[in-house]
Image: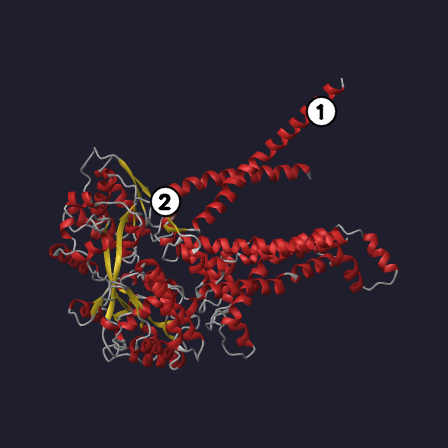
Amino acid sequence: MKKRSHSLAAGARRSESFKSWLIMLPGLILMTFFVWEPLLESVRMSLYKTENIELVKFIGLKNFISVMGKANFTQALVNTFAYTFWSLLIGFVLPIALAMLIGETVRGKGLFRTAAYLPNMLPGLAVIILWSAFFSGEKSGVLNILLGKLGIPTQTYLTRSNLVIPIIISIATWKGAGATALIYMAAMASVNPELYEAAAIDGASVWQRVIHILLPSIKKLAGTLLILQIISVFQIMYEPMVLTKGGPDNASLSLMQLMWQYAFGGSMDYGKASAVAVIVTVILLGMTAVYSYFNNKESDWD
Amino acid sequence: MKKWSKAMALLLVMCLLIAGCGTEKQAEQPAEPTEAPQLSEELQGELDAFSSEVIDADLTCTITLGNWPPDTAAASELALFEGYKATMAKQYPNVTLVPDYYSYSLSNYVPMAKGGTAPSIFQPPFTDPQLLISQHLVGDVTDALAACGALDKFSPSYVEMLADQNGRIYGLPRDGYVLGMHINIELFREAGLMTEEGLPKYPTTLQELAEYGQIIREKTGKAGLVFPASETYGGWLFTNIAWNFGCVGENALEYQDADGRWVCNFTSPQAIAAMEYIRDLKWKYDILNADATTTDWAGAHSALGTGEAAMNFAADDSVDQPTANKGLPLEDFALIPFPAGPEGRYALAGGTCYMFSPDITPEQATALMAYLKILGKLPFLDEDIIAGMRADYAAKKDRGAPVLPAISAWNDEEYNNTKQAIIQEYCNVDMRLYNDFFDSVSEGTITLKAEEPVFAQQLYRELTAVIQRVITREGADITKAMTQAQESFQEYLDDEINS
């Protein structure tokens, strides 16, 4: 009897397991064909000399050595880290501040929420074209017209090496901050209001409530969004491609744009393009691993 | 509330379904114009002149036609292409034509060719055929060209450009172009740079270009010269300037040495002098547009057409850009020869060709030759070809683009003379504003030169980066920048062609 019930339980487990796999199957198929296969193919391609997308000859790490030995790679790598730095400086705190401000709003909260999210609904290219008119260095540039009203002479913006990356990040933040703020607002709304009430009774100021209640409550979420932001900004491509085309003198060239140049910029060197893609993936995997390590360590301390 | 949500969800699903169905149809075939376009009698007459006799009822295939004008194109252009399509349907009733908005670029073509979705015919520039042929990305049309008799009329330079090592041909020339300079006469007038005959007093040398540009800047506040220095455009224009500073022959930007090795040379005194000239345009004469490093080819035409700049290095095949497309009146537009430099007077000669998808069948190749014949692009003369040419120029005139003498890509005197006679008939401009340009080409007072022979796009990219450095940093070390670019490009040549 015991034996029978044991085999029944095992059968039920097998059936459960089969169902689980069945549920996962569509996802696995999609992941295999659209994520893992291209990823592995890209790694394979990076080790070959290519003729358009055909693999011609195995050349080991030659593509990597060639790509990394060039000045534009170093420049693109430095630029990509600069994009990430500016994105953290401009784009990380702003959505939190925005979420806090909208969260504290008593009237017209829906209106502010919609207004903050609106830029995210605009097509990316349209946003870039819109801002290129704003930052145009001609007299007809919107910013120059505004500064002209204050008596400031015409300036150039997108042709200045030291300004292009902060400008591009500001535009990306303008577009994306509202969406991130909505996620923070959802997290902030889930904080138990009794904590605020208790703190208020104890005489805590607004600032103290933010520091001691609000920020700790969204810390985990902020950590996840931080790593997602780094991954996303590290792959920045269309913004500099449309706004500055990587210039001036490669000052806004990103790694992904460099990859595009190898593949489609006239030489059709897919092997070297794949090498750049693999390097980007390795860097991102490294960063994610570091984040996970510290995150896990912190969880252990908790 | 629930009902409202359900209704919204249903509406959304319906919208998605309708959009989904619509997208597929739209991608395959451009929609028919909803209203009959208003055409001039002249153009309508030319469209009606096509023969409607059946030429080959047995030829059965489907061809996809790249470069079909978008729905937003001028009515005359749309009518012209619909006319071609209708004529083809009458003459070859079993050939199905599928219009495709596809416009060629190397980046979008490769995946399409490898994926089997490239249009049957498309139009790359003269810089790309050898790359496409060497990578087996285009179809062989030698037999179809021979069958229709066009092969004998190829000039040897085009055979070299469009053939593989075995002499098989993969395309045919569409038009040639010569680089010169577009002029916005209104700004020249404002700056007082006009002759007694009321023509623009234009620069004949690069030095005059700098000086006149400075006068224009001072008198009008607008840029004397729009210089597209983004991506590869800056390097492309720089090569022509460098030739005029003496970067030819033993001082060429790239050449093959005695051992057959490709070598680049960006550090000759001539190349450095040419780059110093670019520096002076920005920092000494201040005649360049403010955002040169982000300006591309289209942006440069836009700047000239909208009066933001007075001069633009551009060719005779793009005269419709600032005029018909950007609204510059024809009487305010001129085309002049490329200004001479201290060491020479060269002008870049290039062009556009027709090439074909790699999986093209013999039937498709035959049908495409018939289509090109209707377009008037094959070097023969019969009623249909003449009708095709006439309709083409009538459509140009109709939409306000300058109808100018063509720089023919074919070696057939009768064909070229007939074409020029038709052009003259439809000419809609004061030819005094163009004569010097065309005379310089026909009389040989300017030397025509093809683009740098190998990996031109890569070379342009390297030089564009130097130009960007030079025009954004006043104290940039030109020799150092040119040396770095030379080393980088030489490494590329060694990797790609010398190894």
Per the model, the C-alpha gap separating discs 1 and 2 is: 53 Å
In the displayed structure, A211 sits above or below A123; it is below
Q: Position of residue A154 (x, y in %)?
A: 49, 76
Image spot of residue A182 (x, y percent): 66, 53
Q: Find out whether the residues at labels 1 and 2 contact each other: C-beta distance under 8 Å.
A: no
Amino acid bearing label 2: Lys
* Residue under numbered circle 1: A9
Q: Is residue B460 left or right of residue B386?
A: right
From the top left corner, tell me how far across and down residue B90 is, in percent. 23, 38
Q: Which mark is residue A294?
A: none
Furthest residue toward right? A202
Q: In which quarter of the image is the C terminus of chain B?
A: bottom left
Looking at the image, is B393 positioned above or below residue B368? below
Mark 2: few/some/many CA within 10 Å (<14, 14-19, 20+): some
Viewer-side residue, B71 vs A188:
A188
Q: What residue does disc 2 label?
A: B114
Residue B74's spot in the image, x, y percent? 34, 53
Q: In this view, does A209 lie to the left or right of A126?
A: right
Q: What residue type is labelled 1?
A: Ala
Which residue is rendered at x = 54% and y = 41% of the image?
A: A31
Q: Read off the chain for label 1.
A: A
Residue, far left: B414
Q: In which quarter of the image is the N terminus of chain B?
A: top right
Q: Is mark 2 on a helix, strand or loop?
A: helix
Do we see residue B306 in this rendering?
no
Quarter holding residue B7: top right
Question: Dot 1: within a 10 Å radius of its alpha carbon, few (fewer than 14), some, or many (20 or more) residues?
Answer: few
> Which coloring applies here?
secondary structure
Residue located at (41% from left, 52% from top): A271
